[in-house]
Amino acid sequence: MSGDTSHQHRLMIEEAEKPEISNEKTQTAKRVASLDIFRGLTVAMMILVDDAGREWQMIGHAPWNGCNLTDFVMPFFLFIVGVAIALALKRIPSPLKAIRKVILITLKLLFWGLILGYPHASDKLTYGVYMKKIRWCGILLRIVLAYLVVALLEISTKRAQADDLLSGAPYSSYTIGNVYLAILYGTYVPNWHFTVHNKDYPDYGKVFTVTCGLRGSLDPPCNAVGYINRKVLGINHMYQHLAWRRSKVYAPSWCQAPFEPKGVLSSVSSILTTILGVHLGHVLIHVNSHWIFMGLTFLILGIFLHFTNAIPLNKQLYNFNYVCLTAGAAGLVFSVFYIMVDILGFQYLFLPLEWIGINAMLVFVMAVEGIFVGFINGVVALFSIYYVLIITNKSTEHVYWIQKHIFIRVWHSRRVGIILYVIFAEILF
């Protein structure tokens, strides 16, 4: 899987939040089908970039500054979480019941993360965790943190929302954003050192010192995000397979050091994306309208800040510009689905995506986490036809045999075969 979109690069709030929208003038409520479709699209994107990203690096994570297709997946999920929070908590009048529901969902997500969120090998049918180098942060922690914080903010400020759409959780974004910027640009980053633990590297066992001694740097070796993660999490518990290692631009020794793109400070700023999703939910509830104007505003602001070099787009830092661009894109995509499906009634055009969105946890467990691949490999071995495949392909993963002989050889192109396999065999099948 490409860059930071490893097996751990997946999770979403789905069936826990049944997205319905209440018309304040009537007593009936209907499900917002566009939210299911948007969730399904995001899950499909996640599968595509995870399994085709190695062959199509232009859709994988940007090595540092920039934003590729993969870099939209995480904020899209967080935005969906925000919309679902607003729609779900609207139907729970009691704050105590709402808090109880939020806590139960949080525990549920943590449970699934413990079961599915750690390393496993579908070809060897092995699962396990090496505690000395366990990665403390990841997609699960970020989603759980954003969900818990924003949901509690929404519950605690619910009474003021009828008078002002910017009250409650959206209003808190100013404080969160200012705290993030103050820490990012004001924290002093001293010199630091690390040891190369990867046996595949020629510098294995060597100790390197990285010279910093400055504030406000947004470069990979000396930013405040990495410094805080090293102090809080420990360098051995950070992400090892970084996207910048495939780039020829980053050749210094610090490229071999771990870096946690889903660490402490960047997870704080990612809460802003969920808060913006809550604001869209408020618009749906109180105005029954879309978010196209707001989406365009944030999208244009993000593009302007990047190309004027004021604030470069950066997913690893999850900076302000990245929040604006990705939240604006999420708002636009959702608004298009909302107009086409919930207003114009073209729901039948997106039935596959809607099914994926409604059954997002099932798709996550089976397709994204490799459970389906492990199941196929186990069934093949169980019925003793392993020797038939081993003659034609010595790989222990029988699904790779399907990729090679049914897709890659037919099209005489590995890149075309892989992307067709992901679209038809994994997403649609």
Image (spheres, rainbow, N blue to C red):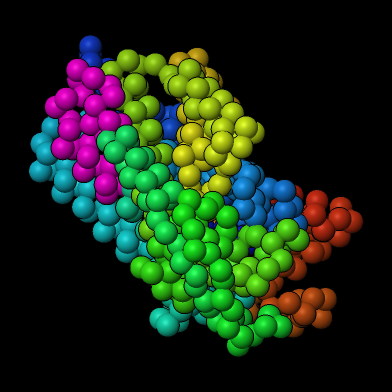
Residue stretch rendered in magenta on the structure: 147-171
| Left or right of residue 98, residue 268 in this image | right
Residue found at the far right of this picture: 412
Quadrant placement of the N terminus:
bottom right
The location of residue 355, given as percent across then percent down, is: 49, 40
Residue found at the far top of this picture: 25
Q: Is 153 part of what is drawn in magenta?
A: yes
The kind of secondary structure the magenta stretch mainly shows is helix
Q: Is 7 part of what is drawn in magenta?
A: no
Say whether residue 50 is visible.
Answer: yes
Q: Please say if 278 is above or below 219.
A: above
The location of residue 120, given as percent across then percent down, is: 52, 74
Q: Please say if 53 is above or below 303.
A: below
| Left or right of residue 158, residue 56 in this image | right
The residue sitting at 22% across, 53% down in the picture is: 104
The residue sitting at 81% across, 63% down in the picture is: 405
Residue found at the far front of this picture: 213
